[in-house]
Amino acid sequence: MKSFIALLLFALLVACAAQRESGVDEAISDFVVLSELEELDRIRTQDQFGTSELTERYAILKTRKDVYLVEFQRCPPQFNDDVIPDIRYDKNTLRPRTDTIRGCRIKKIFAIDEAGAEELTLLAEASAAESG
């Protein structure tokens, strides 16, 4: 009986964690719609950019001059830990639906400003602090 209760509590904790993650994804999706962010067909990267993960579905991408919000179609777990080769058809350009970032296929790329990127980063950090 005790193991059943422990298993039930574990399942509830996992479900709550999954809901928080999808809640952050939903908040970011709402931000995209409300901010009327422009979806881009490609971005020039000059082969140098940095990424910071917001969730498994979203990341902020920074080039030398610009900032972007990237939405992934699918992404393996441990986004920051594993080094996975990228798929690129042009080394200086990132394209949604064809290219990857560290093994994560890009679904959409949105133009965003520094303030928006900071707001989304704070939102993701606040959610991580609540769940951790």
Image: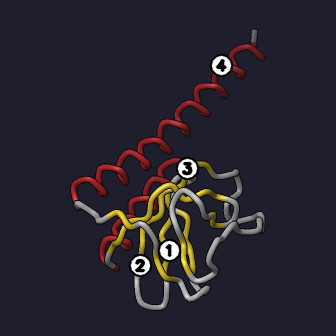
Residue 37 horizontal/vertical position (percent)? 28, 63
- Write down the quadrant of residue 110 in the picture: bottom left
Mark 2, residue position = 67
Within-10-Å neighbours for mark 1: few <14, some 14–19, many 20+: many
Amino acid on which disc 2 is placed = Val
Residue drawn at the location 62% of the way across and 77% of the way down: 90
- Name the front one of labels 3 and 4: 3
Quadrant for the N terminus in the image:
top right
User: What residue is rendered at 69% in x and 51% in y?
Assistant: 76
Find residue 32 and report its horizontal and vertical position in percent.
Answer: 31, 57
- The residues bearing labels 1 and 4 have C-alpha atoms spaced at a distance of 39 Å
Q: Residues within 10 Å of mark 2 (few under 14, many from 20)?
A: many
Q: Could you say whether the residue bearing mark 4 is in a helix, strand or loop?
A: helix
Question: Label 4: how many residues lie within 10 Å, few (<14), some (14-19) or many (20+)?
Answer: few
Q: Quadrant of residue 101?
A: bottom right
Q: To which residue does mark 4 refer?
A: 8
Residue 125 % position (x, y):
47, 62
Callouts 3 and 4 close, C-beta under 8 Å: no
For the residues carrying marks 3 and 1, which lies nearer the camera in this image?
A: 3
Q: CA distance from mark 3 to mark 2?
A: 20 Å
The residue wearing badge 1 is 61
Tell me how far mark 1 sits from mark 2, CA to CA.
6 Å
Earlier along the polypeptide chain: callout 3 or callout 4? 4
- Give the camera-side residue of 61 and 10: 61
Q: CA distance from mark 3 to mark 1?
A: 16 Å
Circle 2: element type: strand
Q: Please report the residue visible at 50 percent of the width from the left and 74 percent of the height from the top.
A: 61
Q: Are marks 3 and 1 in contact (CB under 8 Å)?
A: no
Under mark 4, the amino acid is Leu
For the point 63% across and 63% down, which residue is it? 100
Left or right? Give the position of 102 relative to 48: right
Compare marks 2 and 4 and give the one earlier in the sequence: 4
